[in-house]
Image (spheres, helix red, strand yellow):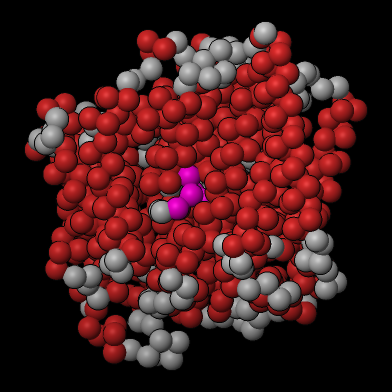
Amino acid sequence: MRELRGWQRWVVGVWLVATALFHLYTATVGILQPRLQRGAHLLLLLPMAFLLYPATKKSPKDRFTVLDITLAILSTIPSLYLMIYNNSLNMRFERVDPLTTTQIILGIIIIILLLEAIRRAVVPAMTILLIAMMAYVYIAPYLPGIFYNKPMKLGRFVEMFYLITDSGIYGSITGISATVVAMFVIFGAFLESTGVGNYLTMVAARIAGKGPGGPAKIAVVGSGLFGSISGIAASNVYATGSFTIPMMKKMGYKPEFAGAVEAVASTGGIFMPPVMGAAAFIMSELTNIPYVKICLAALLGAIFYYIALGITVHLVALRDGLKGLPKEELPSWKKILKESYLLAPAVGLVYFLVKGYSPFMAAYYSIWISIAISFFKKETMMTPKRIISALETSGKNMIIVALACAGAGIVVSVLTYTGLGLGLASVITSLAGGKLLLALILVMVTCLILGMGLPTTPAYIIAVTIAAPALLKMGVDVLKAHLFALYFAKLSEVTPPVCVASYCGASIAKADPMKVGYESWKLGLTGYLVGYIFVYNDALLMRGSVWQILTIVILMSLISYLLAVGVAGYFRKKLNIYERFIVFFVLALAVWATATPKFPKEILAIVVFIVAVVYMSLTKFLIKKREA
């Protein structure tokens, strides 16, 4: 991103503030008509991609070029046309009425400029994906079998991406980014400005900082707490990792391990209620399942994701003899309680959502709560200057999400209107040969590839467009299919070769990105297991009797501990390769038992519980005897 100076810096700042104010304004007066809302959304954000993100590495980093200004101005015209002629466009019959020459030209302009904006601001790989999807439309008539689609004229091609309101660039996905996602981006910026992120890190330090490997545990707890609200892995890494990663290195952790811990902890926030990177709200809209039920279903899986990560960093600290933070460096409980009012926005958000407010309005009211509580302390007071800074940050943070969502609309259009989505689902089910596990593996690989480098919302939407039909054909219910797609679309953040969160952690840790990526993958293995166990065991979704849920809690505790022991290579002593193999073999048996419908899980859970109690009792007895 450019660091502009002088009048250019001022112009962009005013534009970004106006962008955030527009989205707040629509919350007060009510959401506009879909085409007007989405048109204004991209009208405000698309030009910023050309002004803030240079075309190449050699382009100026402190000023615009003539090309940037030209593309920025040109990018406003297609959106303005939709807004000015909204009434007449609402009267036309989609996919029936022909397009005018003007509409075709404007459609081609917006498609080309969006591809260039995504290349600059999001990731070049997404531009390649979009070009490949659009190319498919023209080569489909020459393909055999399920990949065949009848020829499409230029007018219909442009209409599919430009004028249709349920998909395409200005479709429902852009509508979600213009409302719910935009409001949560603003909410996150205000939380950061009022010091909530620092407070959560302070709480994490008090809870986990004293024990072995304290800084790593601070990263796990702090990033989990902050990530559950922010829901953006990369920005979460920079927000908390700039503090935790240097501290981990100082205490003796290897740079690649320090970067990986922060990357995995930050990514886990996407799975942790209440916000889940806005995925819970979008999932609710797509599935018609109440938001509260989705959060409840996702809760246990997210908790065990963090439990396994926390145990792993603890065992690595014991293995390497790493100490915690000195007592004098830990914040006092008195200070934490004194500043606990900073949690009011997050508590308010949950309250409004549970009371039945829309996510859009719940985030809107929580923003005002964050402004109100900032005046409790002089250092966090939201003065006009700080409010403007928060609004400007909000506008910047919206750019990538808006562009990625518009690009996702293109993908969904191609998958939907050509039948490619159902074709890919058929290929997956055919290759699986009726075997659910094989179908899940194929869907997992698809989701990991499609999710690479994308923000949470578009990654989830693109992945679920293919994953859901395939899994539904295999008898998996809607909620499980969507959670499976979400998990693996976002585990791509810590899965090599394209693992954005790991790269961010590596840049702070000054470590080899691929080494950080590999460490991240190992630390995030619990997420892989949770994704599969969701499908096979309803109890992990909080479905079933109390006894069934208690059983899965015990078994998942065992699985999390075994996985941590295997990854860390430590259990009271360093394990050799044969001992680690035994641990992973037992882990595989535990996962198999947990995911097997007819296996007597209750008996296994009782045995595990008894063994755990006996082990802890013997350990405590031996420690007392040694001390005596």
Seen from the viewer's position, the closer of residues 419 and 504 is 504
Q: Which residues are magenta?
A: 269-273
Residue 515 in the image: above or below residue 96? above
Q: Tell me which corner region of the image, top left, top right, bottom left or bottom right, holds residue 152.
A: bottom right
- Counting labels gives 0
Does residue 535 appear in the picture of this structure?
yes
Q: Is residue 282 magenta?
A: no
Rendered-image quadrant of the N terminus: top left
Residue nearest the observer in this picture, 246 or 220:
220
Q: Chief secondary structure of the magenta span?
A: loop
Write down the quadrant of residue 69 in the picture.
top left
User: Residue, x 55% and y 79% (percent of image)?
Assistant: 417
Question: In this rendering, would 190 be left or right of 25?
Answer: right
The residue at the point 61 percent across, 25 percent down is 314
Q: Is residue 282 left or right of residue 595?
A: left
Question: In x, y percent, where is residue 402?
Answer: 37, 55
The x, y position of residue 535, in whole percent, is: 68, 63
Which residue appears at 77% of the width and 79% of the height? Answer: 145
Is residue 170 rendered to the left or right of residue 387? right
Location of residue 199 in the rendering, given as x and y in whole percent from the top left corner = 31, 31
Which quarter of the rendered picture does the C terminus lie within? top right
Residue that appears at 65% across and 35% down: 523
Q: x, y percentage for residue 36?
A: 25, 71
User: In which image quadrant can residue 78 be found?
Assistant: bottom left
